[in-house]
Image (cartoon, rainbow, N blue to C red):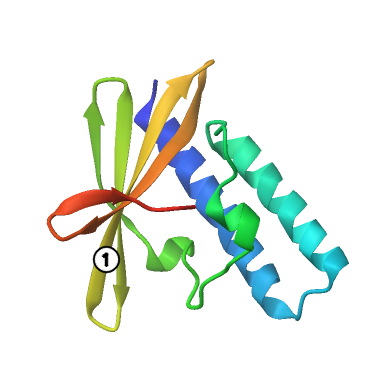
Amino acid sequence: MNIENAKEILLGFMQEMYEWEKKATKSLRSLDYENTLRLELSMIFSKYCTPKKSKRTREISLSARFPFEYKPETHPIIDVKEENKYLFFYIEENRSGLKTQYRYRLVYKNEKWWIDKKEWFTQAKWENYAF
C-alpha cells in the first residue's frame, strides 16, 4: 500500500482522461464517433476506478470541459492524507484567480489502488462530483 503507487494511478487516470477530453472536443460527433468515445471512456474507468452499479454521468453525456478538467499540469496535487483504508489526494484548479479544490478517494483492493470517488469543496464542505 504505497502512496507513490496510488499517486501513479491517479496521474495515469488524469492523463488518459485529458487525452480523451482533447479527442472529444476536436470535432463534431457522429453516431460512430460517440460510440467510440463511450467505449474509450468505459475502458479508462474500468482500468482506474472501482466498479459502480450505475453509469457515471460522463459516460452518459460524453461531456468534456474546456479548459480541460483533467490536465495534470493545471490540476496539481497539493496534499495527500491517509484515513482508515483510504488515501485522499487533494487537487487545486486555478482558473484566472478562481481556485477550486477537488479530492480523489483511492482505495486499495485486490493488490491495486482504485479511484473510488471524486469530490469538490463548496460552501465549506465536500460534495460528490460526477466523473
- Which quarter of the picture shows residue 53? top right
Amino acid type of the residue that numbered disc 1 sits on in the rendered structure: Thr
80 in relation to 87, above or below: below
Specify the farthest residue to the top.
110
Q: Is mark 1 on a helix, strand or loop?
A: strand
Count of numbered marks: 1
Specify the farthest residue to the bottom.
96
Specify the farthest residue to the right.
32
In the image, 49 versus 15, the foreground residue is: 49
Task: Tell me which residue sits at (57%, 31%) in the image.
Answer: 51
In the image, 95 versus 116, the foreground residue is: 116
The residue identified by callout 1 is 100
| Drawn side of residue 81 relative to residue 77, left or right | left
Task: Tell me which residue sits at (26%, 66%) in the image.
Answer: 100
Q: Residues within 10 Å of mark 1 (few under 14, many from 20)?
A: some
Where is residue 90 drawn, in percent x and y? 28, 49
Where is residue 46 drawn, in percent x and y? 64, 37
95 in relation to 106, above or below: below
| Drawn side of residue 45 relative to residue 96, left or right | right
In the image, 4 versus 68, the foreground residue is: 68
